[in-house]
Amino acid sequence: MKPGAALSPMIDRLAVLGEPLRLRALCVLESVELSVGELARVLASPQSTVSRHLKVLAGAGWVTSRSERTATYYRLTPDDLAEPDRALWVLLRSQMDRGGELAADERRLTQVLADRQTDSLSFFGRVAGAWDAVRSDLFGERFTGEALLALIHPDWVVADIGCGTGNVADLLAPLVAEVIAVDQSGPMLDAARQRLAGRGNVRFECGAIESLPLDDESIDAAVCALVLHHVEEIEAATRELGRVVRPGAVALIIDMYAHEQTEFRSQMGHKHLGFDPGDLEGLLAEAGFVRTRVIPLSCETGANGPGLFALAAWKETME
């Protein structure tokens, strides 16, 4: 017998499971049966890559598949595994960190399952009355979200902090009394000025979120869209939000959930690889915000970045 021959089957099994994407796929497929396309969305990976890994897992007996019309669905059922494989899977699963990429997979899975239900309901809705298709043909897809912006109070003064090229300010300016676009980058402010040249109620200020060029309690709402991950001192930033918003006013933070895409540091200058919203809620409480609400944002098809959340925080009112 060749050296190591007795261990060869186990080594082969470990080799199949030695790819992180396959382990993530198994974690997902243990909880729900998914098509290749759905699993690709959950894992935020190209469908061809996911299909290749599923072929390996199926060939080694880790997942089963079934066909339905033009789709193939995959599932991991631990009870159907051979005893050594089942024991190996239980051991591996117990050692996995449920944060980071696995937590992001779970959030995307929630959205994929919600979309599956929506697709099903939309199908029957079209069969019954075809109203959704007619409405989209007539008016497009974006009008509902844009119309909901009209719920914003027209007397508000809103600060778009870290305004970049001004996309948030552009949406808000027609709806409120004034928008103050703040950014510490001169070129970004120049781009925003060019974009918003026709908006007479937008004021531009150069400054960082850690030391905002705004008066105390002068803002009805502050928006920080994909800004905080660029900020070194998060506590200083949340303190400034608490300083500039009025009692009872709101701050809205849009940012990434914690992730493991370390290349974002070197490629885009990110100081933080996303956040746990609970950590931000604690800092906002210290800054005078007494109520918060976190909403996971939908993962659009084709989007490859980490999951996003919106965190709204309301400042304590004056008695």
Image: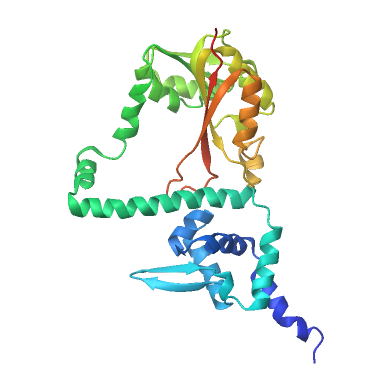
Q: Nearer the viewer, residue 215 or 61?
A: 61
**Identity of the residue drawn at 33% across and 70% down:** 69
Which quadrant is home to the N terminus? bottom right
The residue most toward the right is 3
| Quadrant occupied by the C terminus | top right
Closer-to-camera residue (294/209): 294
147 left or right, relative to 128: right
Left or right: residue 17 compared with residue 160: right
Please provide percent x and percent y for residue 200.
37, 12
The number of numbered discs placed on residues in the rendered structure image is 0
Q: Which percent across, then down, holds residue 112? A: 44, 52
x 39%, y 72%: residue: 67
Q: Residue furthest left?
A: 129
Q: Position of residue 117 (x, y in %)?
A: 36, 53
Q: Which residue is painted at 66% across and 45% down in the image?
A: 262
Above/below status of 140 relative to 285: below
Q: In this view of the protein, which residue sits in the foreground, 308 or 277?
A: 277
Q: Residue at x 42, y 21 (%)?
A: 194
